[in-house]
Image: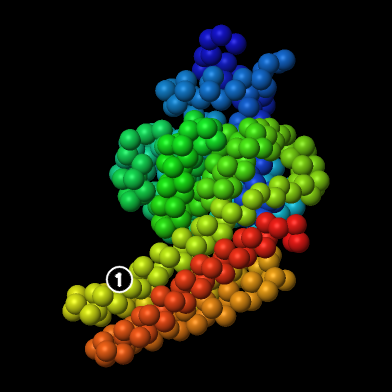
Amino acid sequence: MNHITLHDMKDGLDRNQFQLNYQPKISLHTGDVIGAEALIRWNCGNDVIMPKDFIPFAEKTGFVSILTERVFELLGRDAPFLLAKRPDFKIAVNVSPHDFHKNRIVTYLETLERVNSIAPTSLHLEITEETATLASDELITVMNALREYGILFSLDDFGTGYSSLDILSRLPFSEIKLDQSLVRQVGHNPKAKSIVSGTIQMANRLNLHTVGEGIETENLFEDMAFVGCDTVQGFWLSHPLGLSDFIDFVDSGQRWLPNVTGVLYRAQMDHIQWRHDLVDLYYRIKKGLFDVRHDLNRDLMPHISDHHACKLGKWYTGVGSAYAMLDEYSTLDELHKKFHETGAQLLQLALRKDFEACYATLRDFSSLSSEIIKCLNNLEERISSKAV
C-alpha cells in the first residue's frame, strides 16, 4: 500500500485487519521469559503493513487514539490467556500523547479492568523519549495520577533525544528502554559501551529497570548481560509472535543463561554506593550539617541495621538466592549482616558525638566492605566455573 488514507485505516478496523503480535522479553537475571511487548500489525490482504508505515500518519491525523482503543480491546481478548500462564507477566503497550487527551487512556484502562478483569498494573505503558520531551501539563498530570494507582511507565527509545536526564527527573518512569541504535554498537564501539554501561548504572541508582532492544546476535545478548542490563528483547531471542505461537514459546520452557558478571558487578556497585551514602552521612553529622528532622526520613536511615533492605540485600534474597547452595553465598550474608550492624553503630556513635570511638568503627566498617567485595568476586568465579 503506497499511500495510506484515513478511509483505508477505518476500513482495516472494520475488517478486523489490525492484530497484535507479542515479542518476548527475557530477564538477564534468570534467563526466563518475564513478559512481552504488544505490537500492532496491519494484515491487509496478503501484505503485512508495519507500524512505521502507518503510525506516523495515524499520529498526524489523530487516528492513533482509535488504534490505541483497538489495541486495548485486543489486549482484553488476549491478556487473560497470557496471564493465566504467568500471572506476574508484564505486557508493554505503546501509547501516544493523543491517548492522554481528555483522559482517554484512563477510560481504556478502566474498561480493561471492568470488562476483562485485567488489572492495569499488569501493563507497562511505553512513551517515546520524543513524546516525553514535549510532555504537556495534562499528560504529566495523568501520568502522575496513574503512577499513584500502580501503573508502570517505560521511557522508550532512550538515548535518541537530548533531554533524557531532565525527563527522568520530571516524569514518573519506572523503566527505560535503551534504543537499539545505541545497543547494537555495544559490541564494537567502546564509547557506546561506556554510555550504555553508565546509563544502566544511573538507572539502577534511580531504581529504574532497564531493557535493551534490538538483540540480534548471541554476542550482543552476552554484551548486554555483561554491562548489567535487566531485560532484553530482539530477533535473536524471538520475532514478534501471534498469541498462540507466543504461548507455545512460553510453554517450551526455553531459558537463556547469560554470563553472571554483569549482575554481580551491579551487586558490587550497589554495595559501594550504599557504603558511600552512609559514610557521607557520617561526615555530615561530624561537620554539624545533619538535619535530624530531614535526614532521619531518608531511605538510608530507617533501614541501616536491616541488611536485607538495601539493594545488595534485595538481590541476595531475590535472584541471588539461585546460588544458595554455595558456601560463598552464606559467607556473604554473614559479612553483609555484620557490615550493616557496624554501619548502624558508626552513626549512633556519631550522633552521640563520640568521634574518638568512631575511628576504630569506621576502620572495621571499611574492612568489612572490602571483605564483601572479595566475597562477591569469589562468588562470580565459583558460578562461572564448571563446578556450578
The quadrant the N terminus occupies is top right
Q: Is residue 185 above or below residue 266?
A: above
Q: Position of residue 211 (x, y in %)?
A: 54, 45
Which residue does the image show at 54% across and 41% down from the upper left? Answer: 212
Residue neighbourhood size for the residue with mark 1, other residues' Cα within 10 Å, grouped as few (<14), some (14–19), many (≥20):
few
Residue 146 seen in render: no
Which residue does the image show at 46% across and 73% down from the upper left? Answer: 369
Q: Position of residue 293 (x, y in %)?
A: 25, 79
Q: Secondary structure at mark 1?
A: helix
| The image quarter in which residue 291 lies | bottom left
Q: Is residue 289 left or right of residue 56?
A: left
The quadrant the C terminus occupies is bottom right
Q: Is residue 380 left or right of residue 95?
A: right
Residue closer to the observer: 364 or 301: 364
* Residue ID for mark 1: 280
- Residue projecting furthest to the left: 288
Q: Is residue 352 above or below residue 310?
A: below
Q: Position of residue 144 (x, y in %)?
A: 39, 53
Q: Is residue 295 left or right of residue 185?
A: left
Which residue does the image show at 66% across and 37% down from the upper left? Answer: 218
Q: Position of residue 68 (x, y in %)?
A: 53, 35
Residue closer to the observer: 281 or 261: 261
Tell me the kind of residue under disc 1.
Asp
